[in-house]
Image (cartoon, rainbow, N blue to C red):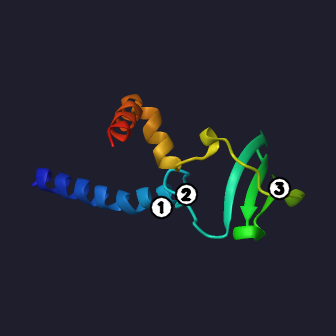
């Protein structure tokens, strides 16, 4: 009888962890969906634990602008506005998951390069 109770409690515990894991994943950079709209983060530079500089691209087409923002607990302030700049190829990110996968699987990049050369 106690083994059945232990199994049921374990099952209920695992089922309860699923929404918790999804909730945590939603709030991390790994699980955050990339918004394909009129705004995207180009770069971020942490200044301190609660202050950072952000470069954000807003608009689309010829109306695109880059905003340099100062973010702190006191608020968000526009520091500079400029025309979009060309990014180096290394700075264009494929996404948080792709970066994490590339870090943990160093052989994957060599395989992808070989398969793209064969085409």
Q: What element does badge 1 sit on?
A: helix
Q: Report the residue marked by disc 3.
A: 69
* Residue farthest to the left, as pictured: 1
**Marker disc for residue 23:** 1
Image quarter hosting the N terminus = bottom left
Do the CB atoms of the residues marked 2 and 3 lie less than 8 Å apart? no
Q: How many marks overall? A: 3
**Which is more foreground, mark 3 or mark 1?**
3
Q: Viewer-proximal residue, 49 or 83?
A: 83
Mark 3 / mark 1, whichever is N-terminal: 1
How crowded pointer 1 is (Cα within 10 Å; few <14, some 14-19, many 20+) is rated as few
Q: What element does badge 3 sit on?
A: strand
- Left or right of residue 27, residue 101 in this image: left
Residue 59 showing in the rendered view = no
**Marker disc for residue 102:** none
Q: Position of residue 89 (x, y in %)?
A: 61, 41
Q: Report the residue marked by disc 2.
A: 27
Q: Position of residue 67 (x, y in %)?
A: 81, 59
Q: What element does badge 2 sit on?
A: loop
Residue located 77% across and 70% down the image: 63
How crowded pointer 2 is (Cα within 10 Å; few <14, some 14-19, many 20+) is rated as few
Do the CB atoms of the residues marked 1 and 2 lie less than 8 Å apart? yes
Q: Position of residue 98 (x, y in %)?
A: 46, 45
Whether 49 is drawn above or below 54: the answer is: above
Cα gap from disc 1 to disc 2, whole angstroms: 7 Å
Q: Viewer-proximal residue, 49 or 34?
A: 34
Residue located 68% across and 66% down the image: 39
């Amino acid at each position: 009888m106690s083994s059945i109770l232990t199994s049921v409690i374990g099952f209920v515990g695992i089922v309860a962890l699923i929404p918790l894991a999804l909730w945590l994943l939603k709030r991390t950079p790994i699980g955050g969906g990339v918004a394909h709209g009129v705004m995207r983060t180009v770069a971020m530079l942490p200044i301190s634990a609660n202050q950072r500089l952000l470069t954000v691209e807003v608009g689309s087409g010829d109306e695109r602008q880059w905003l340099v923002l100062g973010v702190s607990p006191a608020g968000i302030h526009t520091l500079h506005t400029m025309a979009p700049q060309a990014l180096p190829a290394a700075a264009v990110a494929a996404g948080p998951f792709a970066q994490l996968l590339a870090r943990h699987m160093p052989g994957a990049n060599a395989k992808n390069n070989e398969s793209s050369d064969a085409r």
